[in-house]
Image (cartoon, rainbow, N blue to C red):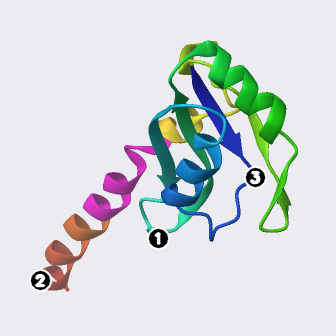
Amino acid sequence: MKLFVGNLSFNTTENDLQDMFAAQGTVSEVNLMMDRMTGRPRGFAFVTMGSAEEGKKAIENLNGKNVDGRDLTVNEARPREDRPPRSGGGGGGGGYGGGGGRGGDRGGDRGGDRGGRY
């Protein structure tokens, strides 16, 4: 069973999660999500437990548990397509794609001709 683990301290490591969840059962995989730009943890992770029973036990025992001064959120991970879409998700800026080229072309064509006529 795949679990979502949220509200993690930025100091929490994959090894910390492995140890914490191993006390609840078999841990198949731990994925601590990192920010691509900064390389720092994003404050949430996915932990895959060996069975549904172990996953439920981990939720019961660890959801709300205070770790590094933060109350963990632990629940069953939902597939991406089941989550509600974020409002205004990347589509909002699409209309501006061509805007950059217009101004540059116009300015470059105008100045060269005029100087010779006066």
Residue at 30 percent across and 64 percent down: it is 104
Residue at horizontal 30 percent and vertical 60 percent from the top: 106
**Does the rendering let one see residue 90?**
no
- The residue closer to the viewer here, 105 or 96, is 96
Q: Tag 2's secondary structure?
A: helix
What amino acid is labelled 1 in the image?
Thr
Residue 49 sits in which quadrant? top right
Q: Which mark is residue 60?
A: none
Neighbor class of circle 3 (other Cα within 10 Å; few <14, some 14-19, many 20+) is some
Counting from the top left corner in percent of width and height, residue 94 is at 48, 36
Residue mark closest to the camera, 1 vs 2: 1
Q: Which mark is residue 7?
A: 3
Amino acid type, callout 3? Asn
- Seen in the picture, residue 69 relative to 105 is either above or below; the reply is below
Based on the picture, tell me whether residue 28 belongs to the magenta stretch.
no
Residue 98 in percent (x, y) is at 37, 44
Q: Is residue 70 left or right of residue 25?
A: right
Q: Which residue is mark 2?
A: 116
